[in-house]
Each structure stands twice: as C-alpha cells, then as structure tokens.
Image: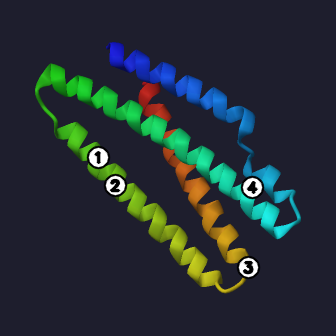
Amino acid sequence: MKQTYLALLLMALTTAAMDGQAKSLNQCDNISDDIAHSRCLDGVKEAVDRELQTWINNQVFVLEERAMKTGRKSALNMFKRANSDFIKYRENNCRWQYLAISPASSASTAYKTCYINLSKSRITELSKLNSE
C-alpha cells in the first residue's frame, strides 16, 4: 500500500514538473520553421514518454503489490507483455505512416505526431485503470 502512495506521489510530482516545460501538439503546429517545429515535437515526445513511463511504473507497483498479497504474478506478467506489445505496435504503426509519406519533409512530423497521440492514448487508458 505504501508503494502505491509513493508511486502516485512520484507521478504527481513528475507530471507537475513536465507541465511547465512541455508544449502541446497545438503549440508546435503554430511554429512555421521546420527545424523549430521538429524540435518542439521532440520536446513533446520526450515529455509524453516520461509521463507514460510514470504510469507504467505505477501500474507495475500496483500489480507487484497485488502479487505479493495473492502469490499470483499472472496479471503482472501479462501487463508486462501487453506493454511490450504496445511499444511494438506504436513503433510499427507510426513507422508505416512515416514510410507512406517519405521522402517528404512532413514524414518526420507524421511519425512524431502518431507516436505522441498513441502514447497519450495509452496514458489515458492507464490513468483510468488507476482511478477505478
């Protein structure tokens, strides 16, 4: 139980720290310079990655705690497999979008936007699990 509270506190602090520095996709879209736009997307991507990792860590803590109480690790193992599968799906789904547009300069933007949107979707999913 203490681990869960610690994880939630860590998540809240990490999210609060990111809010001050992370830009949104909408803010990046308002940047006309290609290099600055790409850097903006990189910043959003990094912030979303950190937030997603925090939610993943939290879910692992919850499932580890449950496994210690019940002696069953099947949910924890399946979550780890699902997370690995999500990472593969996200990479391949965004990669085909990149390849479909390539060699146009917008290919990189399409990849990063796809990556950010899928990561945000996963964050939403994990946050709902923790609020139930």
- The answer to whether the residues at label 3 and label 4 have Cβ atoms under 8 Å apart is no
Image x and y of residue 10, in percent: 49, 24
On the rendered image, what quadrant is the N terminus found in?
Answer: top left
What amino acid is found at the position of numbered circle 3 in the picture? Ser
Labelled disc at residue 105: 3
The answer to whether residue 99 is above or below residue 83 is below
Q: Position of residue 109 (x, y in %)?
A: 69, 68
Q: Which residue is mark 2?
A: 84
Q: CA distance from mark 1 to mark 2?
A: 6 Å
* Residue wearing tag 1: 80
Secondary structure type for disc 1: helix
Tell us which disc is closer to us: 3 or 1: 3
CA–CA distance in space, label 3 to label 2: 30 Å
The answer to whether the residues at label 4 and label 1 have Cβ atoms under 8 Å apart is no
Is tag 3's residue or tag 1's residue first in the polypeptide sequence?
Answer: 1
Establish if 4 lies above or below 120. above
Say whether residue 131 is left or right of residue 14. Answer: left
- Of residues 71 and 20, the one nearer the viewer is 20
The amino acid marked with disc number 1 is Lys
- Label 4 and label 2: CA atoms lie apart by 27 Å
**In terms of sequence position, does the residue under pointer 3 or pointer 4 come before the other?**
4
